[in-house]
Image (cartoon, grey):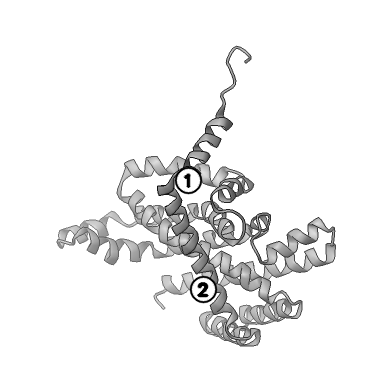
Amino acid sequence: MDLLPRLPLSDWIEWIVDWIKGSDAIGVVFTGIRTFIGWCVDGFGWILALPPSWVWIILITVGTFLLHKRKWGLALFVLIGLLLIDNLQYWSQMIDTLSLVLTAGLISIIIGIPLGIWMAKSSIVESIFKPILDFMQTMPAFVYLIPAVAFFGIGMVPGVVASVIFAMPPTVRLTNLGIRQVSTELVEAADAFGSTGSQKLFKVELPMAKGTIMAGVNQSIMLALSMVVIAAMIGARGLGQSVYTAVGQNNVGVGFEAGIAIVIVAIILDRLTQVFNKNIEQGH
């Protein structure tokens, strides 16, 4: 293989990164993105920190009980899990983690669902974005930290950017899949009644595909939560930072406590989104 010279791929990538960082027009775009993400993170953090922890514990437990058709199993787990997190004094870290996850999930939905609809409506667009989504899902998550730090520095904002890149593909894929799986008879019936494209999309295709779309949103939230420890490496606050610091100090106990808190949050978010999704499918 020495017959072929080594491609200077890393030099090309660094040249592109330097060009982007040096462009005033793109710099304005990045500043806007950084400001928007910062507002979202601070907004979620402010709302979550507004009432004391015991108020949230009661509200979430009662909400889970009502959402889960007055069954106590999941509500009891939510109550015990949140009390444990509060008792271990990880409540503020949990708020930071939820702010990051909710912001990443919100951006994934805002970008992912329209993109999935576009892919469902055009096979050319689908053929273009499919390999990009494959690239986003197969690239090791650590690699996303490099451009995130290069363009947005360190802190919560690059953590959100890296989480969005890693977590968005399921929302896009399942939105595309859900709309493509809508019965052709229903679509033809809508066409026969003279429905416009937007009427067909909002009154037939999206309602029929909502279960699949919500499954994609659930997966995106779980993937965003799985990034919290990795995002802590570039300064993102939260439970991931506690785990990362404990690993650096070889503090097994603290790392285990923060890890348990992450698992509890993950289970609660997963079960609540699943129950919410099931209720939507059943028309409640």
**Residue, x 79% and y 61% (percent of image)?**
246
How far apart in space, not on screen, are marks 2 and 1 (Cα)? 29 Å
At mark 2, the secondary structure is helix
Nearer to me, 259 or 199: 259
Amino acid at dot 1: Leu
Above or below, 277 relative to 224: below
Nearer to me, 170 or 143: 143
Marks 2 and 1 in Cβ contact (< 8 Å): no
Q: Residues within 10 Å of mark 2 (few under 14, many from 20)?
A: some
Q: Say how many tags the image has.
A: 2
In screen coordinates, is 271 left or right of 235? left
* The C terminus - image quarter: bottom left
**Residue, x 62% and y 73% (percent of image)?**
95
**Residue, x 54% and y 83% (percent of image)?**
63
Give residue 30's position: percent from left, percent from top.
47, 53
Amino acid at dot 2: Gly
Give residue 248's position: percent from left, percent from top.
80, 56
* The N terminus - image quarter: top right
Q: Which residue is mark 1?
A: 133
Q: Which mark is residue 268?
A: none
Please indicate, yes or no, whether residue 114 appears anywhere in the rendered image. Answer: yes
In screen coordinates, is 56 left or right of 86? left
**Residue, x 41% and y 44% (percent of image)?**
129
Q: Which residue is mark 2?
A: 43
Please indicate, yes or no, whether residue 215 appears anywhere in the rendered image. Answer: no
Nearer to me, 133 or 6: 6
